[in-house]
Amino acid sequence: MGILADWRYCPRCAAELRIEPDHLACRSCGGLYWANSIPGVQGILERDGRVMLARRAREPRLGHWDLPGGFLHENELPEDGLRREFLEETGLEIEPVRLLRIYLEPYDERFVFSVSWVVRDVDATREPLAADDVAELRWFAPEELPAEMAFPGQVGVLREWAGSTSPEPSR
C-alpha cells in the first residue's frame, strides 16, 4: 500500500490499524485509509518549435530534466495548480490550451496521477527565470530532447508533443 506500508496506528485515535486488502481500517474510531495516487500537473510550453524543460534542483532525480509542474494543493483545481506551478518555477503566466495526457507516474515510493497539458504563454515576450525547485530552464527542439528525463512518463508526453510538431525525434 505504498505510503501506508509502515502505518501501524490510527492518526485520529492512536488505536492499532487493521490491514484490509486495499486499505487500512481502525476498529476503534472507524477511520479508513487508502494509499491514493498524488495529483500532479505539468505542461508543455513551446516557443519557436522548442519545448521548455526544467533541470531539477531537488531530489528525487536531482539534476535531471523535467517538465514544469508539480503537486496540487488540497482543493486546488488542476488548471489553477498548473498556473501556480509555472509561475513559481519559471516566473511565467500560462494558460492551459489542450489536455495532452493522463497517466500514473512512479515517484519515490508513491505514484502520481499526472495530468499533462499543452500550455501557452500569456506574455510570450517575457523570458522565463528558474526559481523554486528548478536549477535551470532550457529550450529543446524535438531532435535535441534529453535521452533521460526525470520521470519515465515524461518521455511519452514529449513524444506526443514532438509527433505533433515534427517527425519522431532521433536519439
Image (cartoon, helix red, strand yellow):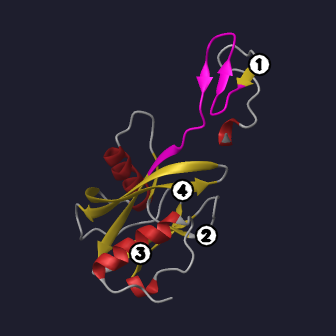
Q: Which secondary structure lies at badge 1? A: loop
Horizontal arrangement in the rendering, residue 81 relative to residue 57 (left or right): left
Q: Earlier in the sequence, mark 2 or mark 3?
A: 2
Front residue of 94 and 38: 38
- Spatial separation of the CA atoms under disc 4 and disc 2: 18 Å
Q: Earlier in the sequence, mark 3 or mark 4?
A: 4
Residue, x 68% and y 28% (percent of image)? Answer: 20
Horizontal arrangement in the rendering, residue 141 relative to residue 60 (left or right): left
Residue furthest to the bottom in view is 170
Q: Earlier in the sequence, mark 4 or mark 2?
A: 2
The magenta stretch is 19-40
The crowding category of the residue bearing disc 2, from other C-alpha atoms within 10 Å (few below 14, some 14 to 19, many at least 20), is some
Whether residue 66 appears in magenta in the rendering, the answer is no
Residue, x 64% and y 10% (percent of image)? Answer: 29
Residue annotated with mark 4: 105
Q: Classify 133 as above or below 150.
A: above
